[in-house]
Amino acid sequence: MLSAPRVGGLSQALINASINQLSLLLLPLTTYFPFIFQHGFSSISSLHFILTFFCCSWFSPTVVPPKAVVVPVSKDTSTLQYLTIFNQRTPFVPIRVVVDLGGRYLWVDCERDYVSSTYHPARCGSAQCSPAGANECGDCFDGPRPRCNNNTCVVEPGNTVTNTAGPGEVAQDVVSLQSTNGRNPGRVVTVPRFLFACAPTSLLQGLANGVVGMAGFGRHRIGLPSQFSAAFSFRRKFSICLSSTNGVIFFGDGPYVFLPGVDALESLTFTPLFINPISTAPSFPLGEPSAEYFIGVKSIKVNEKPVSLNTTLLSINSEGVGGTKISIVNPYTTLEASIFKAVTEAFINKAAGRNITRVAGVAPFEVCFSSRNIVGTRLGAAVPSIDLVLQNENTFWRIFGANSMVKFSWEVTCLGFVNGGSNPQTSIVIGGYQLEDTFLQFDLATSRLGFSSTLLGRQTTCANFNFTSNA
């Protein structure tokens, strides 16, 4: 009598009996391992694999979602744009993108070197189209490939540096970045179906060398803050800390600790965020409000003295014109012409009282001074302070010399504010230079901005987050 064949020291009959007994327990796993269940267990290794998965899945601890995630920020010295980097695609590719604080979503150049096994276009009428604001469908007969597929949702991603837009395909792909406890980066976490716009290469014009797109942090359903919040179940909140070298962006709750142990969360002042009912994007669906972040500046003081302004310019009118927004695609703060004139005249007068001599302007700055009598302090150049007064007289954003003065040369130092001309869409645009070493927390859930005075006053900088991993 022939015995049952043996596999790896066990009889095939015993293996088959074991499989029969386990079949009911393992039935739900056919969803995950269809190949094995369709073709049978041809070897003991197959049985070992499935038993290992079953046991380890049953007894392994639950992976706790992160309380926050973190990405680095660097400043491109040629364009003065702020860049971040994270992983996308399968296999993972580090992608470098321009940080667009008020941008609607992530868009990436897909015409050049976009290769990924997990790329999926959003089909017309699918659940991915509506959150992206896609109202049109498109076809492309040269594909299939990224940005060239039939029956897909179409959007127009915008380059807010050049104020241009181009047709893009709504798609999803894997994104990964590091978690954080607020003190160090931790383990890598993944968003398997991150929505973005697949854009043409031509949209990269005007952006820093080496970047592949722009990362939109604005108030939009598929902006980075909203997608990370949904993926990891934390509040729609992010914080940004820019530097002239390397800064940091957090998504989620604090603490936000900088060497030598300074928690920026402990020194925040809060003010409401406002929504402009009219979009300020290069291209947008009709009726969509602005994704950018506006605050309510009520008045401006120079050296703690009020400046006479046309205050109607400080409010957003029914056509979406006026008000104050924060935009780091603007390297310096821009002021509407009459506001610029009033603020700079007051500043020049107060500087003269300190024996600071005005010299010829240097583009893009109209107001410059001799560096000879400007004294350096821990908070930058010792010059008159500029206060943006917010909801009341006791709530103001004070700009010290570190953020108001730009050293053009050893002989010349300029006031880092730019004349925005007459009739700009937004009266005051707070630019990137004025935000450096200032901690900002954007709470989208409560529509509130938390801001610090310069971190230099607390003997740290935005470059002092410890990116040494504790994973």
Image (cartoon, rainbow, N blue to C red):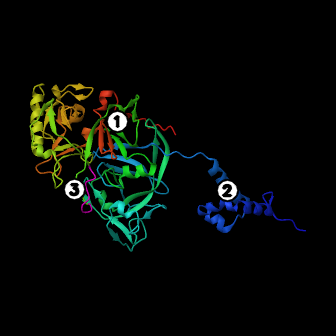
The local crowd at label 1, few if under 14, some if 14 to 19, many if 20 or more residues have their Cα within 10 Å, is many
How far apart marks 1 and 2 lie (CA) works out to 48 Å
Q: Which mark is residue 146?
A: none
Q: Nearer the viewer, residue 109 or 398?
A: 398
Magenta segment's dominant SS is: loop
Mark closer to the observer (1, 2): 2
Q: Which mark is residue 49?
A: 2
Q: In terms of image quadrants, where is residue 180?
A: top left
The local crowd at label 2, few if under 14, some if 14 to 19, many if 20 or more residues have their Cα within 10 Å, is few
The answer to whether 59 appears left or right of 422 in the picture is right
Q: Is residue 291 magenta?
A: yes
x and y, in percent, of residue 432 in the image: 26, 42
Say if residue 360 shows up in the picture: no
Return the residue at label 3: 278
Magenta span of residues? 284-292
Q: On screen, 152 above or below 319?
A: below
x and y, in percent, of residue 3 in the image: 86, 65
**Disc 1 and disc 3 in contact, CB within 8 angstroms:** no
Which residue is farthest bottom?
Answer: 141
Return the residue at label 1: 462
